[in-house]
Image: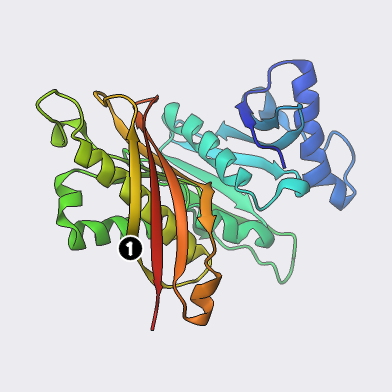
Amino acid sequence: MYKKLHLVIPQSDESFERYYDLRWRVLREPFKRPRGSEKDEYDQVGDHRMLVAEDGTVIAVGRIHFNSPEEAQIRFMAVDPNFQGEGHGVTLIHALESAAKEQGAQRVIINSRSNTLGFYIRCGYELKEEADTVKNPAAEHQLVKALDRPEYIVYRPAWCEALQKTWHEQIPITEAMGIRIYQYTGRTFELRAPLARNINVHHTMFAGSIYTLATLAGWGMIQLHMQEEDLEGAIVLADASIDYQSPIHEEPRAVATLSDMEGDFTPLKSGKNAHLTLTIAVYNNEDFAAFFTGHYVVKAKR
């Protein structure tokens, strides 16, 4: 597994050669299509993205092009089979949607075969036109996703909306602090809060607010991962420590990463509590500001 990946825009002939090679190997070779069939007339005007490992291996590729000023379309999404199931598809979807949104798109459409339909639905796409796969098993469904909201969640948006609603209803201080779920990718979970609602006499973020933001980032990541695994339980923070590195005077951000989670959910399946440790990075905009380590207990449903 490659630990560090880079999201890049292919520009050179050599980078495009590797980009198209993965397209062909994943999307065309299995169907015995010839080289060249992985390209179309929109490649010259489309926006391309690819995820590349440090050694140059291309992990995932994708493209957007515009059908109208308001509508972008994602095509030729491909992830190397050796790296599927690691969240790279979501990373690529996020990059392509962001590029579309920056250029004024209000919605994105995707055509999908049945075997990838579930993935796109998890990414917040809604079925617009269902294909007749009885007559044609290779027929593609059409899905659409609105981008016209100021902020949107790239993965499991309904789950994130429900989680934030639960926090605001059951932990009123979270709404007073303005804590909101900014993004979830299946592998990362990010919370943000406005500095103005959490400021101290030094015009920086109150230490207690930083602690709360980090605590909830860990809780949120655990909760969403439990839903991914179809598990239930009550999450409590058993113990925690925080190392404040520098003051926060810009945009506060707390980021939890699944790879930084230690522990095992298995006991929940037999009615026992699960113990997890999760480290959270807190940022002052893009600058590292605090390091939080939380020891959480998930109480099994009795």
Q: Residues within 10 Å of mark 1 (few under 14, many from 20)?
A: some
In the rendered view, would you say 234 is above or below 144?
below
Q: Residue at (50%, 30%) from the top-left corner?
A: 99
Residue identifier under label 1:
236
Question: Label 1 sits on what residue type?
Answer: Val
Between 130 and 212, the residue placed more toward the observer is 212
Left or right placement of residue 169 versus residue 137 in this view? left
Of all residues shown, which one is farthest toward the top? 12
x, y percentage for residue 294?
Answer: 38, 50
x, y percentage for residue 195?
Answer: 20, 31
Of all residues shown, which one is farthest toward the left? 201
Q: Residue at (78%, 37%) from the top-left corner?
A: 22
x, y percentage for residue 198?
Answer: 16, 36
Pick the quarter of the image with the N terminus.
top right
In the rendered image, which quarter is residue 4 located in?
Answer: top right
Is residue 220 among what the camera can see? no
x, y percentage for residue 217?
Answer: 36, 48
Pick the quarter of the image with the C terminus.
bottom left
Is residue 280 among what the camera can see? yes
Of all residues shown, which one is farthest toward the bottom? 302
Between 12 and 224, the residue placed more toward the observer is 224
In the rendered image, which quarter is residue 151 located in?
Answer: top left
In the rendered view, would you say 269 is above or below 240?
below
Q: Residue at (41%, 44%) from the top-left corner?
A: 183
Label 1 residue SS: strand
